[in-house]
Image (cartoon, rainbow, N blue to C red):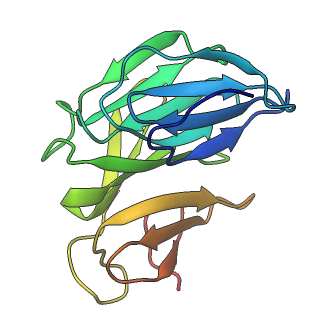
Amino acid sequence: NGQIFHFPRFTAANDASQIYVSDDREVRVFDEDGTYIGRSDWIIFPGGIDVANDGNVWVTAFGENTIRKYTSSLQLLQKFDGSNIPGGLSAPHGVEQGPSGSLYVADTLNHRILRMTVDGTFELEFGLRGTSPGEFSAPVGLATDSEGHLFVSETWNKRIQVFSPDGGYLT
């Protein structure tokens, strides 16, 4: 389609068959045929992308320690800097909205997972740096199932762990 990517990292798709790709300094959206539709505002190293239950798009920016909420056409709605989160944000990567509506964020260099509301209100955190079950070493990827179980992939521990919606270690 003629698009040149610089550093594509994460992808997500919505029910309208639009594909979102986080690239070096922006998020781009394409239709199912690969036709370029548009892009977000300037982001310093966008990371994880999730299309929420309401169709909005969540994006982490690990280069600026923020979480952003966009419309499906990538118009910025909200930007959270983590100032309301104990310890702030440090290179957030994965982002995932669970079936209950809570938003999970892989706070990668703080070696923890955050749960917050869609208006940015901090709810809870779980995990700490380590190699034991329930501990993390650079968590990056997140996914949930229909029951709300949270799957977390880690860079340095080279594993995937499963947690309850409230952060309880399952496996």
**For residue 97, what is the image quadrant?**
top right
Q: Tell me residue 167's x, y (percent).
A: 43, 65
Q: Tell me residue 80's x, y (percent).
A: 31, 25
Is 145 situated above or below 132?
above
Q: Tell me residue 85's x, y (percent).
A: 21, 39
Is 134 situated above or below 47?
below
Instruction: Tell me, yes or no, if residue 130 can be seen here.
Output: yes
Is 10 situated above or below 169?
above
Is 134 situated above or below 107?
below
**For residue 135, what is the image quadrant?**
bottom left
- Is 83 displayed left or right of 139 in the figure? left
Outermost front residue: 2
Please name the residue shown 28% across and 87% down the image: 131
Please name the residue shown 63% across and 28% down the image: 3
**For residue 82, what is the image quadrant?**
top left
Outermost left residue: 87
Residue nearer the viewer, 133 or 21: 21
Q: Tell me residue 39's x, y (percent).
A: 56, 17
Please name the residue shown 28% across and 74% down the image: 137
Please name the residue shown 24% across and 28% down the image: 81
Outermost bottom residue: 132
Question: How many circles with numbers are drawn on the protein?
Answer: 0
- Is 114 displayed left or right of 165 in the figure? left
Residue nearer the viewer, 112 or 50: 50
Instruction: Tell me, yes or no, if residue 52 can be seen here.
Output: no
Q: Quadrant of the N terminus?
A: top right
